[in-house]
Image: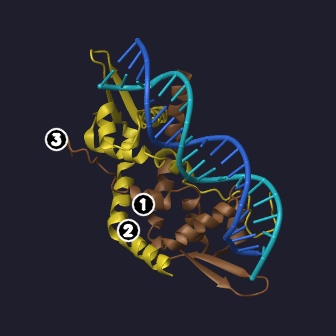
Chain colours: A yellow, B brown, C blue, D cyan
DNA sequence: CGGCATCCCAAAAGATACTG
DNA sequence: CAGTATCTTTTGGGATGCCG
């Protein structure tokens, strides 16, 4: 890809300043997991699975590993019989909670407008 | 506030209250487009493309159509030679701007902690 | 210039079976 | 219980070419 400096703005470098956060937090299933953990202090693997019926164990494991790696989720393994694993959000992830609340409020305030626009568009 | 409601055991799951917003706004390229339009009042197709070097025309078109359908972007076609198309955000989409700013602030405040956690995880 | 149509592929996600 | 391993499927996205 080439850098075209002809325009008034330098074109090659206009990255979205919050795109890294999107990749971290809003990847599929990810924000759902974080939101559940933000309400429950700690949850077991099977508990998460039953709250998100559509997710398979494989994918849920992948997301939890990634969140753990990124410091957003803590995993505690209890060597018992049967084994028990508890997931919880870290203090770092808890700083996302206001964002989740804002998004929920936006949804309550404006989602209907989106659905209306969609209907109007489809009728044309 | 501790929420430890024991109302589980219904299989319907526990849907994420802002997941529709995530699908609308944080799909790939989408928030980048909205953020660019929130800064430029109106932009042409090729202008968007040059600000987002990695996106192909096909995908950019798909995203813009979807945003137009959802009432978040307005498309204005000028019948000239050569043809000219201008995109802009709608008032509805401009209500998302505070969210974008919050995400940018979160990134500035906490992204380094994520990268640190990642390094620590990978060293183990 | 700003697309749409078509074909194609890689990556993500799902299904299933199995284990410490 | 909490995963892992393997395989299959889906689908989002890239490449190319044509058109008003």
Q: Where is residue B28 in the image (x, y as percent from the top left)?
A: 57, 55
Residue plotted at (37% across, 36% down) = A90
Q: How many numbered marks does the figure carry?
A: 3
Can marks 3 and 2 be said to lie on one chain?
no
> Which label belongs to residue B6?
3
Q: Where is residue B48 in the image (x, y as percent from the top left)?
A: 67, 67
Badge 1 sits on which subunit?
B
Left-right relation of B99 to B33: left
User: What separation in Å lies between label 3 and label 2 (alpha carbons)?
Assistant: 29 Å
In this orientation, which residue lies closer to the viewer: C9 or B123?
C9
User: What separation in Å lies between label 2 and label 1 (alpha carbons)?
Assistant: 8 Å
Can marks 1 and 3 be said to lie on one chain?
yes
Left-right relation of C8 to B114: right
Q: Is residue B21 visible?
A: yes
Vertical comparison of B9 with A69: above or below: below
In this orientation, which residue lies closer to the viewer: B3 or C13?
C13
Badge 2 sits on which subunit?
A
Residue plotted at (45% across, 65% down) = B98
Q: Is residue B2 visible?
A: no
Residue plotted at (33% across, 37% down) = A49
Give the labeled residue for mark 1.
Answer: B21
User: What separation in Å lies between label 1 and label 3 (alpha carbons)?
Assistant: 27 Å
Left-right relation of B35 to D16: left
> Which label belongs to residue A111?
2
Vertical comparison of B73 with C19: above or below: below
């Amino acid at each position: 890809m080439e850098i075209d400096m002809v325009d008034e703005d330098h074109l090659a470098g206009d990255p979205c300043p919050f795109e890294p956060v999107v990749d971290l937090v809003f990847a599929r299933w990810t924000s759902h997991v974080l939101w559940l953990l933000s309400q429950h202090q700690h949850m077991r693997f099977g508990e998460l699975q039953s709250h998100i019926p559509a997710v398979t164990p494989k994918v849920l494991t992948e997301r939890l590993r990634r969140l753990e790696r990124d410091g957003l989720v803590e995993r505690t393994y209890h060597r018992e019989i049967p084994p028990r694993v508890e997931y919880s959000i870290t203090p770092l992830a808890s700083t996302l909670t206001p964002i989740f609340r804002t998004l929920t409020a936006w949804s309550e305030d404006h989602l209907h407008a989106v659905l209306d626009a969609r209907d109007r568009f489809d009728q044309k």
